[in-house]
Amino acid sequence: MTEEVETLIADLEAEAERDRPAAETPDVGIIMGSDSDLDVMMGPGEGGDGRPGAYDALVEELGFAEQTSYDDPPEARFTFETYVVSAHRTPELMYAYAETAAARGLEVIVAGAGGKSADLPNMTASIAYPLPVIGVPVQEKSVDSVIGMPQGAPIVAVDAGKSFNAALSAAQILARQHETLRERLEAYHEGLQADVGAVSRELHEGGTPAFRARREE
Ligand code: RP5
């Protein structure tokens, strides 16, 4: 094991020993098998190509902040942390991450991996059990590997690349205990409804050619 990995593990273990108030610890843990998963897991960032990801759902839609220091938490009440953890290249780090997750204050983990042996989500679910883990297959070919858990070893999973939904699901789990978050989830959904309502009226009242022309503007 390299020194960098050893230090990461030691930091996670030390954090698990601390007894911080829930408001100061990350609520959601996001892990991915490689930094090449970043755009799928978190979204492509400003100006990037691709569908929105967990970062967009949590930060842009639900008011979470990314926690980058355990000693200096963001002011936002709801936070998430982000790590690269490889199931096959850094199994000890995966074990330490999952094993310490509950003690470090996490309420739910979103875990994504690509390739045909996308083992990070399901192994994390087994180790962190009974903490819920939401698996994200980073590629289509990863779906079977992520969802194929034996009876008694549960994982919740989304379709390939749907990290945005995984983040919403994580927030839904948290919202069972946090009224504010329930209200934010409802407001997000109302926004979606309003969009459909507006577009439906425009199509109906303007007719197909005018609607098409406006979309092509
Ligand atoms: C990449 O390898 C995938 O996107 C995956 O998340 C990553 C990690 O695989 P392991 O290092 O666990 O084998 O192709």
Image: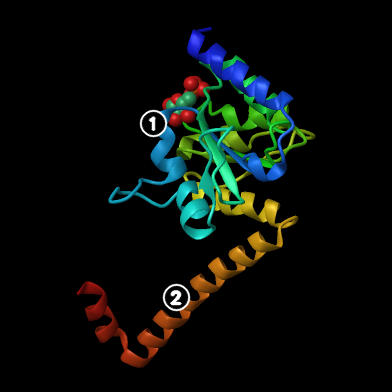
In x, y percent, where is residue 210? 25, 86
Estimate the spatial distance between the alpha carbons at disc 2 and disc 1, rounded to whole Å: 33 Å
Mark 2 beta carbon near ligand 1 (under 8 Å) = no
Q: Quadrant of the C terminus?
A: bottom left
Q: Residue at x 54, y 51 (%)?
A: 64
Name above or below for residue 27 compared with residue 201: above
In x, y percent, where is residue 22? 71, 43
Which residue is nearer to you in this view: 186 or 10? 10
Q: Which mark is residue 162?
A: none
Colour scheme in use? rainbow
Quadrant of the image occupied by residue 214: bottom left
Answer yes or no: is residue 115 visible.
Answer: no
Mark 1 beta carbon near ligand 1 (under 8 Å) = yes
Q: Is residue 212 left or right of residue 176?
A: left
Packing grade of label 2 (10 A; few <14, some 14-19, many >=20) is: few
Q: Which residue is mark 2?
A: 195
Callout 1 secondary element: helix
Which residue is nearer to you in this view: 214 or 27? 27
Q: Mark 2: which amino acid?
A: Asp
In x, y percent, where is residue 171? 63, 53
Q: Which residue is mark 1?
A: 36
Name above or below for residue 18 compared with residue 67: above
Answer yes or no: is residue 23 visible.
Answer: yes
Packing grade of label 1 (10 A; few <14, some 14-19, many >=20) is: few
Q: Is residue 47 left or right of residue 104?
A: left
User: Which numbered disc flags the more N-terminal residue, 2 or 1?
Assistant: 1
Q: Mark 1: which amino acid?
A: Ser
